[in-house]
Every structure is written in C-alpha cells, then in structure tokens.
Image: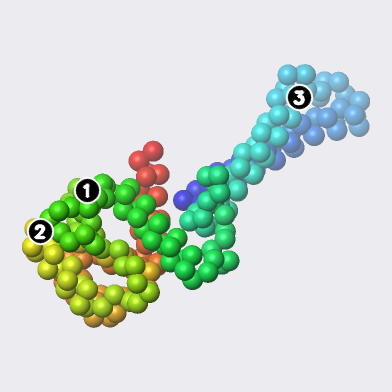
Amino acid sequence: MKNKWLLVSSVSTALGIVAGTVYLFFAEHSLLQSNNSWVLSAFWSAFMLWSFVLMFVVALLFNVLAFLELDEQHKLFGLALPLRAFLSSADKKQQFLQDAEHFLQRLGKLSHSPRVSPEYRCLQAEQEKLVYLQQDDQAVDINQIRALFQQMLAADFSSGIIVSYAGFSSQAWIFAREANIELLDARSLKKQQKLQRQQQFAMV
C-alpha cells in the first residue's frame, strides 16, 4: 500500500515541478528579454503558481501517509506513531492481542458461544471458525492444538485459529496444518494485515 502512496507522491512532485518550471520560464523570460508576448495572462500565472503549490502539498500528504503506514499498530488521535521500539514486553504483548482481535473482527463477528468452553470464541465469517487467543507468555504446544481440535470436532467447526504472541512449537505448526487450524504469531499477523489492506484497497 505504501508503494502506491509513494507513486502518487512522485507523480504529484513531477507535476509540481512542471508547473513551477513553466511559471518561472515565462516570468524570467519576460523580465530578462522584456518581451511582453511571452508574458502569461493573470489567469494562467495564478493557475501555474497554485498548481505548483497544490502538487507539493499533495506529495507531502502522501509521503506522510506512506511513513505512517510503516507502523500503523500504534495510534494517537487516529494517526499511527512509530512507538513499537519503546514499548515494554508486556505492552507489546497486549498491543499484539488487541491488533489480533481487531483483525479477526474485520473478518467477521467474534463472540463467545455456548457450544464451546468459555476460553474459546466463535468467528462468524464466510466459514465459521473456532478461535483461541493465548494469554500466557509461553509458546503454544501440540497439546493446546489438540485441545482446540477436540473442541472443533465436538462443536462441529471445520477450521480454527490460534493467536499467540509467544509463538508456536514446531510440532504445533505441523499438527495445526493437518487439522486445518491457522496459527497467528506477530510475523504472520503482520502479513495477514498487509494482505487484508491490499484486498480492501483493490476493492475501492
């Protein structure tokens, strides 16, 4: 997405340069050569000048958008701030869980269900999924994957999602792939968020 912001910024900068060059060329030519036939009318002079200013304002705006998108997880008054490096480990974990929950809510309705244990949630999207958000600081192991899979079978879920800031064991990754369970750690969540933004932009 930020590449498209930078592309628009580059085009705006180029147009601003063209407008500024045309304005200065005619202004300098009329002053140095004292040739009134090369003087732009008041309308076109104002048009070129304001086009120059507007294009650089647009370029600046899209540069800022591209910069903010580098780290959009932390927001202040709706604007993203690159503050991830200054957060403590506990803050990073809490922020990750909030981001993961927001991501899931954009996929569908996330709620508790009487069909499963209270620690699990139901994601109602195109395909109903069983969701588990790991609150501990330990990596998810194969036993937790099996527990989710048993809940899936008991409640008739065809797929599931486990979210863990601490990551997953190698056995957990293998079993989850076979059981149609998606695993989201910090890296995979970031990839999914990027893919989701690209899909939303393509639909606009």
Instruction: Compute the Cα span from label 1 to label 3.
Output: 56 Å
Say left or right for 192 vs 23.
left
Name the spot of residue 94 as percent of width and height, x first. 43, 63
Density class for disc 1 (Cα within 10 Å; few <14, some 14-19, many ≥20) is: some
Looking at the picture, tell me which residue is in the foreground, 40 or 150.
150
With respect to residue 152, does 49 lie above or below? above
The amino acid on which the numbered mark 2 sits, given as a three-letter code, is Ala
Label 2 sits on a secondary structure element that is: helix
Name the residue that disc number 2 marks: 155
Name the residue that disc number 1 marks: 125
In this orientation, does residue 152 appear? yes
Density class for disc 2 (Cα within 10 Å; few <14, some 14-19, many ≥20) is: some
The amino acid on which the numbered mark 3 sits, given as a three-letter code, is Ser
Residue located at (28% from left, 80% from top)? 170
Name the spot of residue 89 as percent of width and height, x first. 49, 71
Instruction: Compute the Cα span from label 2 to label 3.
Output: 72 Å
The amino acid on which the numbered mark 1 sits, given as a three-letter code, is Ala
Say left or right for 45 vs 107.
right
Which one is earlier in the sequence, the residue at label 1 or at label 3? 3
Which one is earlier in the sequence, the residue at label 1 or at label 2? 1
User: Which numbered circle lies on residue 45?
Assistant: 3
Place residue 135 in its image quadrant: bottom left
Name the spot of residue 95 as percent of width and height, x first. 45, 60
